[in-house]
Image (cartoon, rainbow, N blue to C red):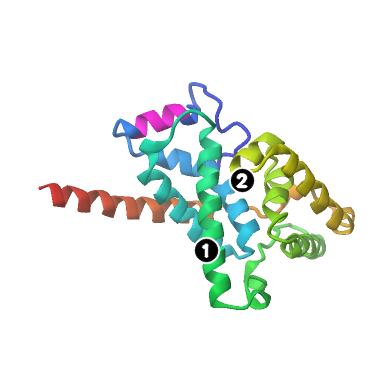
């Protein structure tokens, strides 16, 4: 799965986001899969950071892509496509968070063992230690207030710049810096005791990536077919 660090760079093998958007608008809908695979991990991480639940994060990804596709004609080149797409996912994640909070007490939502993503390793002893460290840090991130979690995830886990994070979350750069500083202070002990970089957390594997892409493409196919039937 393609990482997001070079997502917007244009080359012969890796067309820019803007080129892909133009091609999709012109009818080459297959290019939407390229965009999804390009941004799956980023959107998963920010959705998971808001919701603290893997299944909900995957659902948010699917709905965010469907929303983006339906409103692709509204995308303008005033900001980056990555920021525009991330804002759609953030909006959808917070909407789901509000609905979920209304349905169940906060204390019992999103903290089950099913949220955890195991860390593969050929050494069972090292795997157990790595998995425990990963769980400890992910649990610490989950314990952050929602004010701080998305900022920390985008800056420290996904590796976005301050300006990119501000654009994605609709915040000022000063606000991003302040929230990140406070989140780091809250997580200082967990970060000091973990042997891996935060960027190694909240991985979105190839199997998950394929599942989301397939589900979105299936729903888009149904939508397009239904639209054609109505026109006939």
Mark 2 vs 1, N-terminal side: 1
Crowding at label 2, few (<14), some or many (≥20) Cα neighbours within 10 Å?
Answer: many
Whole-number angstrom distance, CA of label 2 to CA of label 1? 16 Å
Residue at coordinates 73% horizontally, 50% vertically from top-left? 152
Residue at coordinates 82% horizontally, 47% vertically from top-left? 181
Residue at coordinates 66% horizontally, 62% vertically from top-left? 117
Q: Residue 204, can we see it?
A: no
Q: Is residue 183 above or below residue 34?
A: below
Q: Give me the disc on residue 96.
A: 1
Crowding at label 1, few (<14), some or many (≥20) Cα neighbours within 10 Å?
Answer: some
Residue at coordinates 42% horizontally, 42% vertically from top-left? 33
Residue that label 2 marks: 169
Q: Is residue 122 above or below residue 20?
A: below
Residue 174 in the magenta stretch? The answer is no
Horizontal side, residue 156 vs residue 195: left or right:
left
Q: Position of residue 191 (x, y in %)?
A: 85, 54
Q: Nearer the viewer, residue 170 or 50?
A: 170
Q: Nearer the viewer, residue 158 or 124?
A: 158
Q: Residue furthest left?
A: 232
Horizontal side, residue 91 vs residue 108: left or right:
left
Q: Give me the disc on residue 130.
A: none
Query: What residue span does the magenta drawing correspond to?
Result: 18-24
Q: Quadrant of residue 7?
A: top right
Q: Nearer the viewer, residue 136 or 180?
A: 180
């Amino acid at each position: 799965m393609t990482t997001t660090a070079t997502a917007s760079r244009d080359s012969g093998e890796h067309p820019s986001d803007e080129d892909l958007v133009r091609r999709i608008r012109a009818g080459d809908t297959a290019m939407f899969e390229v965009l999804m695979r390009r941004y799956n991990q980023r959107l998963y991480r920010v959705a998971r950071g808001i919701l603290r639940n893997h299944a909900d994060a995957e659902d948010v990804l699917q709905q965010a892509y469907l929303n983006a596709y339906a409103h692709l004609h509204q995308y303008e080149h005033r900001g980056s496509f990555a920021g525009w797409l991330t804002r759609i996912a953030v909006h959808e994640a917070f909407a789901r968070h509000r609905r979920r909070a209304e349905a169940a007490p906060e204390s019992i939502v999103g903290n089950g063992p099913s949220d955890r993503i195991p860390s593969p390793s050929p050494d069972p002893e090292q795997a157990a230690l790595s998995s425990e460290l990963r769980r400890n840090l992910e649990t610490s991130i989950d314990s952050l207030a929602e004010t701080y979690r998305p900022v920390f995830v985008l800056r420290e886990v996904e590796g976005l710049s301050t300006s990119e994070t501000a654009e994605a979350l609709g915040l000022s750069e000063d606000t991003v810096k302040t929230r990140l500083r406070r989140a780091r202070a809250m997580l200082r002990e967990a970060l000091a005791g973990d042997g891996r970089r935060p960027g190694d957390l909240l991985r979105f594997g190839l199997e998950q990536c394929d599942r989301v892409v397939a589900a979105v493409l299936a729903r888009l196919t149904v939508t397009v077919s239904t639209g054609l039937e109505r026109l006939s």
